[in-house]
Image: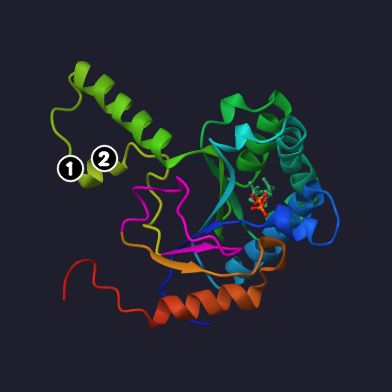
Amino acid sequence: MQTTCKHVAIIMDGNGRWAKNQNKLRTFGHLSGSENVRNIALAANKLKIQVLTLYAFSTENWKRPMEEVEYLMILPEVFFNRFIDELMREGIKIMAIGDLTRFPPNTQRVLLSAIEKTKNNQGLILNFAMNYGGRDEIIRAVNKIADDVRLGKVDSIDESGFESYLMTAGLPAVDLMIRTSGEQRISNFLLWQLAYAELVFTDVSWPDFKEADLIEAMQVFENRNRRFGGL
Ligand code: FPP
């Protein structure tokens, strides 16, 4: 499929409900969800999407029960141990946005090592939003700008100047945002970056979201008339 869609962002919702429907633990849903990250990353790479940003852990997810948070903390290690060689072979480049410093040292090490190992890859950028919140990102940008004003480096700022302080600096604008599992909310994801994105909501849970569902969402995107405020 030919696409004009450069940057796809996904809220991978529904792991817990998917597991519960099968009388399994929520953590089993997250494990299946992480396996699906591999499937959809390979599909996106094949479709020549430039960037796939996945909401893997929000600044609000710390409120979940400790066992679930701890499980989500070890998932990156399970994921990269299993899939880093394949991602490397496919030329996929790992990136992360969010404040990683609150994660256990080993989780940080695993993520930073995947980022380092894949940094020269030229395929899909697989960008994990981890301990990420859109409001947090904007506040951090504002504080950095205030520092630069105090240092005399900046005196006024326009939209592209502001973007250069965001964690997504340098990435293309988000074209399409998909949320799985029925909810129709943004939930503090990429608040600035979604300004002109097309939004697609599907009832399919994240572990069941397949390449065909991604292609269908992209077809919806291609059929929409993007006017960016014009006529
Ligand atoms: C939302 O579903 C999902 C999350 C909070 C976690 C998403 C994480 C993954 C899919 C794995 C990430 C993988 C790596 C490698 C970091 P939910 O649990 O809120 O589902 P529910 O609404 O059905 O309860």
User: Residue 7's mark?
Assistant: none
Residue picked out by circle 2? 162
The overriding secondary structure of the stretch rendered in magenta is: loop
Disc 2 Cβ-to-ligand 1 distance below 8 Å:
no
Residue picked out by circle 1? 158
How crowded pointer 1 is (Cα within 10 Å; few <14, some 14-19, many 20+) is rated as few
Disc 1 Cβ-to-ligand 1 distance below 8 Å:
no
Mark 1 secondary-structure assignment:
loop
Quick check: is 180 in the magenta stretch?
Answer: yes
In this rendering, the answer to whether 21 lies above or below 62 is below
Provide residue 30's location: percent of width, then percent of height: 74, 50
140 sits to left or right of 159: right
* Residue 24 in sight in this render: yes
At 51% from the left edge and 36% from the top edge, which residue is drawn? 98
Number of marks present in the image shown? 2
At 58% from the left edge and 25% from the top edge, which residue is drawn? 101
Q: Quadrant of residue 228?
A: bottom left
CA separation, marks 1 and 2? 6 Å
Image quadrant where one finds the C terminus? bottom left
Residue 17 or residue 228, whichever sits in front:
17
Quick check: is 185 in the magenta stretch?
Answer: yes
The three-letter amino acid code for the residue at tag 1 is Asp
In this rendering, the answer to whether 153 lies above or below 199 is above
The magenta-colored residue range is: 176-195
Q: Quadrant of residue 163?
A: top left
Name the colour scheme.
Answer: rainbow
Residue extending furthest toward the left = 155
Asked if the residue under mark 2 is in contact with the one under mark 1, i.e. CB atoms within 8 Å, the reply is: yes
Provide residue 120's location: percent of width, then percent of height: 56, 49
How crowded pointer 2 is (Cα within 10 Å; few <14, some 14-19, many 20+) is rated as some
